[in-house]
Amino acid sequence: MASSSSWLSLSLVNSYAYAFLILLTSSKNATGCYTSIFGFGDSLTDTGNLVKIDPPDDPPHEAFPPYGETFFHVPTGRSSDGRLIIDFIAEYYGLPLVPPYVEWKNEKRTNFRKGVNFAVIGAPTLDLAFYEERGIYDPITNESLKVQLAWFKEILPSLCNSPSSCSEFFQSSLFLLGPFGGNDYCHSFYSKANIDEVQSFVPIVVEAIGSAINELIDLGAVTLVVPGMLPLGCLAAYLTYFETSNETEYDSMGCLIWLNQFTEHHNELLQREINEIRELHPHATIIYADYYKAAMPLYHSPQKYGFMRGAIVACCGTGGLYNFTISIVCGSRPSLGCDNPSLYVDWDGYHLTEAAYSLMSKSLLDGPYTIPQINSPCVSLPVPADSSFDW
Ligand SMILES: *[C@@H]1O[C@H](CO)[C@@H](O)[C@H](O)[C@H]1NC(C)=O
Ligand SMILES: *[C@@H]1O[C@H](CO)[C@@H](O)[C@H](O)[C@H]1NC(C)=O
Ligand SMILES: *[C@@H]1O[C@H](CO)[C@@H](O)[C@H](O)[C@H]1NC(C)=O
Ligand SMILES: *[C@@H]1O[C@H](CO)[C@@H](O)[C@H](O)[C@H]1NC(C)=O
């Protein structure tokens, strides 16, 4: 049970895991835990960048209630009612919640030694130019993966100033790279690109993620967590957009089969890419974080995990089969609220609730193949009395 359960599917049967154990035991600076986290990604990881990028007179809808209602009690720019997976990882290691880079930059704060987060809501992997040439537009942001890497390189001199000092510094750093891909594909579909065309972007997107991994390793990163995409075919926004009367297009959970297959295709290519990079850099630990598999049990048996309103209807929305309407998204009307987000898996159509992210994080952090426990135990995530989240 447990072995198929870990979404952090660093399969210990392969030799990389062995290399990884060596790395842990031979690490000179085994302080007991990670000392910093660097984040990259999109709305699944953004802890407050987009709200500081958009002009104050035209903030994104994530800047309004009920975003943040469960944990922070104010909107923080996170795309959920509370904490994201990156927050649960930070808490687990006893680190501060990873601050949004743009906010810190605006405030002229320069101490990034405990890490910083470059992820931006709406961020695509590939630069906008790639899409614009094809008539595809991302209305949210142009802060692609490449832009986020450039930000990282800007702050690098404040952390270390030579290849050896950077290797030293990043020995105890965790890099969370992603997930990426959601915005590349979503905006393509919304711009009416057909499935074959969007499918042809997948290897290009995956290769861009791969070169970012390589670049970070070249800059000194040694431990990278690279998440796959969530099952897009189970998200209320896509279920609404691609709604069809053809029942055979849905699986038993009510998810769109073709779209989940598309997502799995991306995830498969990404894992292949990661395998190749592991060969090139045996000293690095690259962990594939299987968000897809981590989320699946919640869609299979939502009630078992307390999601009494089910998994595919959004908590914060405006009605319809999935409680999602693209023209009136969560946060865009003061009247939109959701009294009990913990009863839902889906928060706003595109993102999950804190309750769902919390369970996913637990399966990562308490799983048998956890993010490397550098030596001694870290501050532990509180484990609910009913710790039956295994599958
Ligand atoms: C992103 O867009 C903003 C304004 O729309 C512009 O000022 C900025 O230069 C762009 N950034 C990049 C990297 O293209
Ligand atoms: C690692 O330990 C060395 C001394 O052994 C120290 O000089 C260095 O600052 C430490 N690095 C980190 C990242 O803690
Ligand atoms: C319904 O969907 C199935 C599976 O995608 C497809 O094979 C079939 O042709 C569709 N039927 C209609 C009437 O469109
Ligand atoms: C849809 O969202 C609204 C407002 O956010 C919420 O009050 C309502 O309970 C949701 N509907 C369903 C069926 O979950």
Image (cartoon, rainbow, N blue to C red):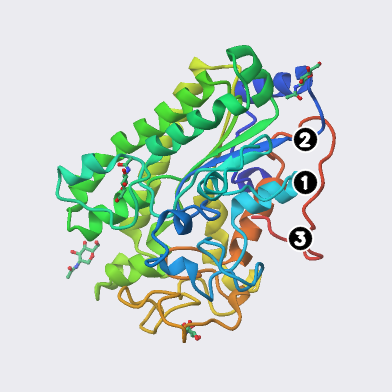
Query: Are discs 3 and 1 less than 8 Å apart at CB?
Result: no
Tell me the quarter of the picture where residue 125 sits. Answer: top left
Q: Nearer the viewer, mark 3 or mark 2?
A: 2
- Seen at 31% across and 39% down, the residue is 126
Residue at the outermost front position: 108
Amino acid tagged 3 = Ser
In space, the residues marked 1 and 2 are separated at their CA atoms by 8 Å
The residue wearing badge 3 is 387
SS at badge 1 = loop
- Seen at 42% across and 42% down, the residue is 267
Q: Earlier in the sequence, mark 3 or mark 2?
A: 2
Amino acid tagged 1 = Gly
| For residue 385, side relative to residue 346 (left or right) | right
Kindly tell me whether residue 269 is visible in this rendering: no
Q: For label 2, count other residues whose C-alpha is less than 10 Å away and answer few (under 14), some (14-19) or many (20+).
A: many
The quadrant in which the C terminus is found is: bottom right
